[in-house]
Amino acid sequence: MPFAPAGGTDILARSLAQRMAESTGQQFVVENRAGANALIGTEAVAKAAPDGYTLLMTTNIFTINPWLHSNVPFNVERDFAPITLAGSTPNLLAAHPSIPAQTVKELVALAKARPGQLTIAAAGVGTPSHLAAELLKQTAGIDLLIVHYKGTGASLNDVVGGQVAMSFGTLPSLAPFVKAGRLRALAVSGAQRAASLPAVPTASESLPGFELLTWYGLFAPAGTPHEIIARLHRETVKALASPDVKQRLNAQGFDADGNTPDEFTAIIRRDLARWQKVISEAKIRVE
């Protein structure tokens, strides 16, 4: 896993690892190999032996990185074999209670009255939370000051502490702080309201057409034999469907998906086109 512990990817990876270890009789070890905007851990899997023993659990940072970096040390379409989209979650726009905005409409008005003054946290340049903030800026026509951190945990600490006004992070990461009253939820980014926060409106109710999901996918190195991909797909889907895993993930705000490798490949290609446009318009580049 190319991220630090405690984020949404970590929650999903460890839930799957436990269940798949039980069903296969094999030990699954979640190795957090963070750094360089997920490039370090992702490259390690790209160069691993295609034998089914080294897998990648990542997010849609996978389809963002190719447009951010001039020297990505792998090709996302050539060097990986998609197994399944294991889960997805809407992002949650949440603000510190001190911010005088109860809704997205009020937040947009406040941002237009204070251009460049309202701060929004991101877990690093080019991360999904950063791109969510950029998409919000572009869609609403507002100027927010994006504050970058090295990981989700550090960014959340400052939002909860009030040093930064808001975050547009994953629902599993932010929802506990909303339920504890330490953050105010303004909107979820999915097409429908989230079952875990049914009173929170969708962003599209204020910004028509705005929709954004963070997905979590499982990959093997390219060249992994078809029968191994098929076995890993079956075991992952079975784990996602087990009542305890499903309940745990749903409680955290995940939709446990488990689509086919071909369906997952289509999502990857769609996202590559989408993020190329957003990143180009925002003129984001990481060297």
Image: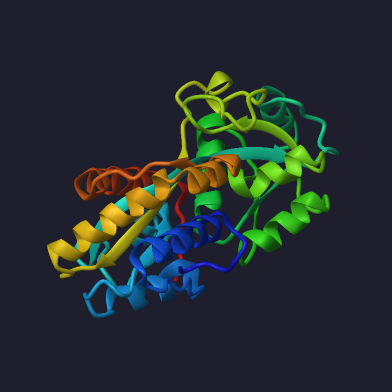
Q: Position of residue 163 (x, y in %)?
A: 81, 54
Q: Nearer the viewer, residue 38 or 241?
A: 241
Q: Residue at x 37, y 54 (%)?
A: 217
> Can residue 280 be seen in this snapshot?
no
Residue 257 relative to residue 190: left or right: left
Residue 56 relative to residue 161: left or right: left
Residue 30 relative to residue 232: left or right: right
Residue 242 relative to residue 53: left or right: right
Q: Nearer the viewer, residue 251 or 186?
A: 251
> Can residue 172 be seen in this snapshot?
yes
Classify 287 as above or below 135. Answer: below
Q: Residue at x 83, y 50 (%)?
A: 162
Q: Residue at x 64, y 63 (%)?
A: 149
Q: Position of residue 152 (x, y in %)?
A: 62, 59
Q: Quadrant of the C terminus?
A: bottom left
Q: Position of residue 126 (x, y in %)?
A: 49, 57
Classify 196 as above or below 27. Answer: above
